[in-house]
Structure formats: C-alpha cells, structure tokens
Image: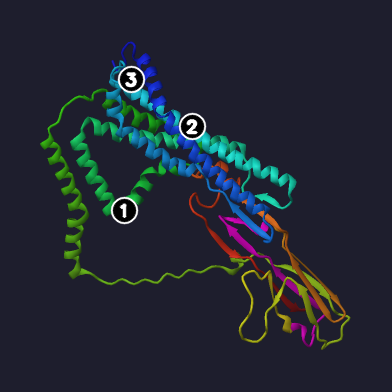
C-alpha cells in the first residue's frame, strides 16, 4: 500500500508548516508585485495626463510572464531545501508519502496565489484606466476585455505552471533517489543541450508541440491532465521507495564532483574542438542569396479618393496649394527638410501647373503605425478635407488626439482557435514591436 492510516493527518500538519515557512517570503513577493504594479500604473497615468503629443501608446507589461519565471525559481528552491526542512521538522510524524504530498499541495497553493496576483494586477490596471476614460476623451484599449479569455486563461496558466512544477518535482525526486548517478546524467544532458543549443530548442519545441500547439481548449486540458498524472505519478512512486538517511563518504563526494566536471569539460570543450580540427580540411564556403519581396498593395493601406470638379476653369490655368498639416514634396531633386513628425506628404503638385483636365483627384493613403500588432491610427480617424477657392486648392489633414493603452494578460495563452479573432493578446508574448509610418501620403492627379 502507498498510503497508510493516519498519513492524511500528517499531510495536513506538514502542509500547515510549509505554508507558515513560506508566509514571510510571500509577503515580500507581494510587496515586489505591488511596487511593479504601482510603478507601471503611475507611468501610464502620468503619460495619459501629459499634454503635447497628438497620439500616444502606453504599454503595460504582462506581469503573468515574469511571475511564471519566478515560480520556476521557487519550485527549484523548494527542491533544494526538501531534505533539510524535513530534517528540521522530524519531530512531526511523517512518511515519504506525507512529505511528498504536503510539499505538492504547498506548491499548488503558491501557483494559485501567483495566478490570482497576476489577475488582480490586470483588473486593477484595467479598472483605473477605465475610470480615466470615463472622464477624459480619446482613451482607448488596444485589447478587448474578454471574460471568457480571462477565466480560461487563468486555468490554462495554472495548467502550464502545474506541468512545470511536475517536471521539476520529477527531477528533484530522481536526484534524491539516485543522487550521484542522476547528477552525472543531468550534467551530461545539460552540457549537450548547451553545446547544441539551437538543435535542443527545436527538439523541445517539436516534442512539446502536441500540447503547446493544441488549438482546442478542451483537448489541451485533457492532454495536460494526462501528462500531469503520468509525471506526478512517476514522482510519487519513486519518492515512495526513496531512502533519505543513507550516509555517504566524503571521498565519494569528491570523486563524484570530479567526474561531473570532467564530463562537462569533455562535452563542451574537447568534443567541439576535435570536430573543428578534423573538419578544417574538408570545409567549404557556401553562399546563398535570399530575396524577400513584398507586395506594395498589401504593405500600404487602400487609397481614399477625393474628387474636385475644375471643369469651369480654363485650360492652362495654374493652381496654387495651401493647407494645414501637410508638407509639399518638391518636384525637383534636392534635400527635403522634414522630420518624422511631419503629418502628411503631398506629391504631384506639378499637375496643377498648366491645368489640362476637368477633375482634380487626390489619392489619400492614411498612415499606419503598428505597435505589438495593433494599428494605432485605427483609433485616430485620420482624414483629409479639400476644396477649391478661386485658383487656390486648400488641403487640410488632421487626426484625433488619442491615447491607446495596452493591458495584456496571460501572454502564454495564445494557441487556441477560440481566441484567435478576439483581439485579446498582443502580437508576441515577449518584447515590444513597432513598424510603419506616422505620416500620411496625398498624391494629386488630373483627369
């Protein structure tokens, strides 16, 4: 039997001890999260209230991603102190099973608290900006508030964290069961992965694709639950038959350290050096040229046409141009004096000299500027007005003053078909990407 009478009471007592031991650490963790929250919120509020820039974007980091990395450190730390903590708590009745289950439950409590912290930070950000948007015009959310995504994302996040915990727990259990052999094997494995980093990354991506690329939310939970049961079950069985009080000699430890160091040196230094040495005489130079083409029609937004009747003007007339928010590109070659803040460029003005036609056609290409996959000008309503007075063509370009706020959550939850068209996450889970042009283009033709 794997469970004996009274072990549930032991689990409950040990779990209480684990949670008390981590209470102070949790307080400091919440303080760090609160500082990060207040810092990012203050920058966003100050940026929105600051005047002087017509269109701005405010990016709030998805705190669930750094919390995930912090959880990995916590899980590894708990494996490190596993033996020493239970040695200090030896006065309490315990078995292999009760020790294992108690720490597992403590870890899952930590996961739930961490996920709830990320959710509270997200909702607080969203709530504060929503209040500001109620009293101030021109504030928009780049991402939609989707309750289904928020709730489902919480459980997907919990599932990923649980699987990471299960893998770390399995590694820790193996190390406690077969310490020396396991460390030698892990050292060799990690050294091989470092020496072949890109190949290792590609292998892991392909190996985990059945889970990380699963588009169905229901199938994801089934696969995650099955994988978790297998990994956790293996850890439980190995832990059940582990002896925790076996002594080891100091000379054995020294030999073990030397063997591990030798394996790492051979894999990382000696083998690559030999490969390079024997491949020098057979090396060849390979050059390749990759041609990347982009379709202009796909790259630029569709042009809007503005048509002005000039049939009442005599042929050969000369028209001048005046306007607000535009820069007239000269017809001759030379140095153009403009900046990246130039609202709009006007070209084709030479067609207004010696007029030969009945209609002035203005083709207006609205600007586009993507931030994390979102076009900011979709909120700014860029528009052109044009009219003719006498021999002067007036062209005015303007757009609304807007603040576009990015508040992402559950950055790793982006694989499911259910949310692909919901505008609920940014283009990439990490980093910050921009592209495009903030200037419009207006071209004049005569028909």
Give the magenta-colored segment's residue range: 351-378
* Horizontal relation, residue 23 to residue 123: left or right: left
- The residue located at (65%, 87%) in the rendering is 332
Q: Position of residue 98 (x, y in %)?
A: 33, 20
SS assignment at label 2 = helix
Give the camera-side residue of 123 and 434. Answer: 123
Rounded to the nearest angstrom, the CA distance separating label 2 from label 1 is: 34 Å
**Distance Cα–Cα, label 3 vs label 2:** 23 Å
Q: Earlier in the sequence, mark 1 or mark 3?
A: 3
Image point (46%, 37%), residue name: 29
Q: Quadrant of the N terminus?
A: top left
Query: x and y percent of residue 194 in the render?
Result: 28, 52
- Residue 202 in picture, x, y percent from top left: 35, 51
- Answer yes or no: is residue 333 visible: yes
The 10 Å Cα crowd at callout 2, few under 14, some 14 to 19, many 20 or more, is: some
Q: On the rendered structure, is 73 left or right of 293?
A: left
Residue 360 against residue 22 in the figure, above or below: below
153 horizontally vs 400: left or right: left
- Mark before the other along the chain sequence, 2 or 1: 2
Separation of marks 1 and 3 at Cα, in angstroms: 39 Å
What residue lies at 80% left-to-right and 85% top-to-bottom?
Answer: 355
Q: Which labelled disc corresponds to residue 113? A: 2
Q: Which residue is mark 1?
A: 197
Q: Which residue is mark 3?
A: 98
| Marking on residue 139 | none
Q: Secondary structure at mark 3?
A: helix
* Residue 425 belongs to magenta span: no
């Amino acid at each position: 039997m794997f469970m004996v009478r009274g072990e549930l009471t032991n689990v409950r007592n040990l779990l209480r001890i684990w949670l008390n031991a981590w209470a102070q650490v949790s307080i400091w963790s919440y303080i760090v999260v609160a500082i990060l929250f207040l810092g990012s919120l203050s920058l966003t509020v100050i940026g929105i209230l600051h005047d002087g820039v017509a269109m701005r974007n405010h990016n709030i980091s998805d705190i669930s991603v750094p919390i995930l990395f912090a959880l990995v450190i916590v899980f590894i730390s708990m494996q490190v102190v596993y033996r020493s903590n239970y040695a200090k708590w030896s006065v309490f009745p315990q078995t292999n099973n009760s020790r294992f289950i108690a720490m597992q439950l403590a870890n899952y409590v930590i996961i739930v608290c961490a996920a709830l912290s990320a959710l509270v930070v997200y909702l607080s950000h969203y709530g504060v900006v929503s209040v500001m948007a109620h009293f101030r015009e021109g504030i928009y959310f780049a991402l939609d508030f989707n309750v289904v995504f928020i709730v489902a994302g919480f459980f997907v996040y919990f599932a990923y964290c649980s699987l990471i915990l299960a893998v770390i727990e399995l590694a820790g259990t193996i190390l406690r069961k077969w310490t020396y052999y396991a460390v030698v094997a892990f050292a060799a494995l990690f050294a091989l992965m470092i020496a072949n980093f890109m190949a290792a990354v590609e292998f892991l991506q392909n190996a985990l694709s059945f889970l990380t690329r699963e588009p169905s939310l229901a199938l994801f939970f089934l696969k995650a639950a099955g994988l978790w049961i297998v990994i956790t079950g293996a850890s439980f069985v190995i832990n059940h038959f582990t002896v925790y009080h076996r002594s080891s000699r100091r000379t054995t430890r020294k030999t073990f350290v030397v063997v591990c160091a030798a394996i790492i040196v051979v894999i990382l230094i000696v083998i690559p050096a030999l490969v390079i040495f024997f491949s020098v005489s057979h090396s060849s130079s390979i050059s390749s040229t990759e041609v990347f083409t982009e379709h202009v029609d796909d790259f630029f937004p569709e042009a809007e046409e503005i048509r002005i009747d000039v049939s009442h003007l005599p042929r050969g007339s000369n028209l001048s141009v005046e306007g607000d928010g535009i820069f007239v590109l000269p017809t001759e070659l030379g140095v153009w004096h403009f900046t990246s803040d130039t609202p709009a460029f006007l070209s084709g003005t030479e067609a207004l000299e010696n007029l030969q036609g009945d209609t002035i056609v203005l083709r207006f290409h609205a600007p586009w500027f993507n931030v994390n996959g979102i076009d900011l000008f979709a909120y700014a309503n860029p528009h052109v007005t044009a009219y003719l007075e006498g021999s002067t063509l007036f062209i005015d370009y303007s757009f609304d003053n807007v603040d576009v706020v990015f508040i992402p959550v559950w950055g790793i939850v982006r694989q499911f078909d259910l949310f692909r068209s919901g505008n609920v996450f940014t283009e990439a889970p990490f980093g910050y990407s921009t592209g495009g042009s903030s200037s419009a283009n207006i071209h004049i033709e005569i028909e």
